Image: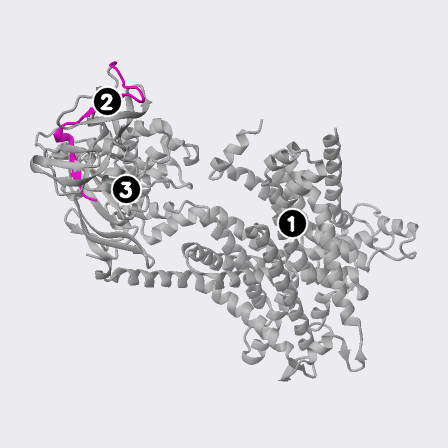
Amino acid sequence: MRKRNLQRGLSAFWWLTLAFLYLPLVVVVVFSFNATNSAAHFTGVSLRWYRRLLGNEEILSAFANSMILAITSSVIALVIGCLIGYGMYRHRHRKLGWLIVLIYLPIVLPDIVFGISEMTFFVQIHRLTGLLQPGLETMIIAHVTFQIPFVALIVYSRFVGLDPSLFEAAKDLYASPWQRALHFMLPTIKPALISAFFLSFTLSIDDFVISFFTAGPESATLPIYIWGAIRKGVSPEINAIATLMIGAVAIAAVLSLLFSYRRPTRSTANHRRGTEESEP
Amino acid sequence: MAYSDVIPSLRSRALVSESRHLLFTVAPGAFWIFVFLVLPSAYLMGVAFMTTGPYGLPEMPLSVESFRRLAGFGFLGWSPGNLYTLLRSLWQTLVSTALVVVIAYPIAYYITTCREKWRPIMLLLVVVPSWTNQVIRTFGWMNLLAPGTPLANLAESVGLIDPNMGLYPSNFAVTLGLVYNFLPFMVLPLYAAFEKLDTAQVQAAQDLYASPVRAFWHAVFPQTLPGLLAGTVLVAIPAFGMYVIPELLGGGKGMMLGNLVANQFAGSANWPLGAAGAILMLIATFIGLFAMRRVGKRLGGGEEVVI
Amino acid sequence: MTPSTMAPDTGTRKPDTAHVRDIDKSSVREASSIELQGLHKRFGKTTIALDGVDLTIEAGEFFTLLGPSGCGKTTLLRILAGLEEPDAGRLKIGGRDITDTPPHKRSVNTVFQSYALFPHLSVRDNLAFGLRMRGMPLERRNAKVAEIAEFIQLGDLVERRVDQLSGGQRQRIALARALVCEPDVLLLDEPLSALDAGLRSQLQVELLRVQKRLGMTFIFVTHDQQEAMVMSDRIAVLDSGIIQQVGPPRDVYERPVNAFVARFMGHDNLYRITARGEGGRLSTELGELHCESPGAGELLLVRPETLDLLPGEQPGKNRLLATVGERLYRGSHAEYRLDIGGTSLQATVNNRGRHLPEVGERVTVAVAAEDLVTLGQ
């Protein structure tokens, strides 16, 4: 009896918390369709703010910058991070403390310290050599820096989860070093590479602080544009861009759900089967 | 033939090729992080010990002037502004972390009591909002707390705020924003801890006549401590250095250390002062990490705590 | 149906290696004899895995490396596979020195203890992996895979995914994946250790049958002396990186060369020889015994199954008076612990329905002089 009450209370608390988590997003979406520019009253459905977006070249270029930044940095981070992840795995029996510290540094450093370190450094390098003018180039460098650890750790943990004799089996079955990389390692860690890419991409799109400090005048991304617009005053137009970005995340969420539901039927099925079968 | 008679000639060759392998795989990334993060951070630390030049840029000679300014000593004598900012950062971190724990603990527990096939979806529902850009999420709260919104009207009718004022900018709004922002970071590690929970211990406790409260305290809570610590690290450290939320929801009186630092590089330029603030933030970060590791090790659940 | 490439021809030549049982010489490939010379291997600064191993393994042999964990048997196997490099020594297969040949260029395949099936590939692609890496065209590859699948009787397993297989099935796939490459030598690293007892003995028989039909050299690593005796043409017993004894199972079991081998093969009845007399007369802790062909060793081995228990006291040559201390009745036989003047002796008596002495009973132990073996420390 008492247990049932507890469960009911928890259930109510769960729905309240979900409401808390989604309320701000729902408000943004709803008011993006508002006919007037009031932030407090919903007066009717209209698409005027979306229409206005399309005509705004600043927003279109911010969108393009965001995409270029996210894709380029994710690809570079994937290559570099994958190499480190493999190196960490292959040499895991050695003392690699310095490497672990180096890899955790971008993760633990507060965003703001990260951002201003890069900014002051880039500014000084630019002053001394003329290289690294603040812009997309410097933003890509900064983003790759915080993406590398995540890729490396994902790839590393995938390798650690493998039976070490698989590597030897590949050697034993006549695979040369290149064949091993191509026919064994890459296909085996493919799921890890895919999720590492998407995580890098999300991290890049999500980032505001580091982008903000490393950006140049021409390289504003969507979050930077939105930031600027908010500082000028709340406008329904921001709701419209924000809604589009929320929509993109929602699609990504659904995709990731489908992906994680399909995946157990492949390699992890054996691991999970035991627990699933015990469910009535 | 005894072993000492044999000269291990092949081994050294193998060792060289192994080292080269290590170099090829690890060097590009290590080099990248070193050049684009370690060197810049080192430079920033150097900046903190330089003098402020005419445009706020660092200049020689070395001095600790910026640390004095950070402590509040200016041209007009001591002012408490910076000290308040620092204390406010600590307070906000403390309060928001505590609130996050209070909300996340039952939520994480509740998810583990649900059917297995629902759990990934429930976790996803908790995490998805945090995939949206921080600026947008904070903007959502600005919409919700603005003057004239239902929440603001409610607060006004109860007499919490003056008429025609919104719920933001305020310290309350900053706390709210922090809790909202960091809730998923606490739910995930706590969920992992609850999922691994050894229910035999709970049954043993009940079997030994423990009341539900005591069974929880002795059998459940200690097992979730590693998750709790991991979550605290994930919440408290970034909360202390938060920039976006106090900037948008806090206004002048809700400023935190992050804003103080950032302002020295954006608006009123004073690089050495900002760098000194950054050092303070770094020290706090490392003290936090170190403390959690120590506590985590003593609890025996060290691995989870080391993120 | 036997695949043409793998089936032994029905030749008539007798094998010239006496200890290789019932093998058709014509199917034994000369390329598959193995020669190890002075192999040394050390891990770190202190751990010595191999301390000078010299060994010749003949083509077509089922050869077992037997020893406790850490004795160096797995290291030796890995050196053969090319997965470890020896610090010193040479390794020849079919007369060709392959010490410095990397594993992917050796005509040697391994069945791993964990089976090491590639999780990202289907069973069919797992079987074809080695052939594909060697650049065999698709059509021939498929034909070979079909052939091996029939030979090992995999049936429809080929169409499954690796994660749908049971332990025994994985084991057979791993075997088939190695065999399909037609290596000169097949290495098996405790391939049956993860299986339960019933399946294990079934697969032992199957493995043996496959080896005899193919005439391939098998090198088998195990720590189970029963398994080693069932399977092998010859056994090498290893301890602390040194080969203690090499020989056919009967030799190793019945005539161990030292206390380590004797104990590892399951013998406990070892007694110190205190004095020697004429005609093989030995004084031991048990009393006076005659040994037909005594060696120089200081220990005497009395195998429990060679002992006869006679009722009452019937003294004589090679007879000892004893009291029954314990009896373990096992149905087909009974195991006894006897007490001979304070020294304990174990005896095994087959249950032929006759009287089995009870605990406390006085009995006489009789042993034949040719069944006694002397051995070194």
**Residue at 16% across, 38% down:** C374
Please name the residue that numbered disc 2 is placed on.
C363
Residue C19 belongs to the span the image colors magenta: no
In the depicted view, which residue is nearer to us: A89 or A194? Answer: A89
**Left or right: where does residue C279 sit relative to residue C88?**
left
- Chain containing mark 3: C
How many numbered marks does the figure carry? Answer: 3
**Residue at 33% across, 24% down:** C328
Q: Percent x, y for residue A208? A: 66, 61
Q: Percent x, y for residue C323? A: 27, 25
As drawn, the label of residue C67 is 3
Few, some or many residues within 10 Å of mark 2 (<14, 14–19, 20+): many
Quarter assignment of residue B166: bottom right
Which amino acid is tagged 3? Gly
- Where C233 falls versus B39 (above or below)? above
**Numbered disc in front, either 3 or 1:** 3
Please name the residue that numbered disc 1 is placed on.
B228
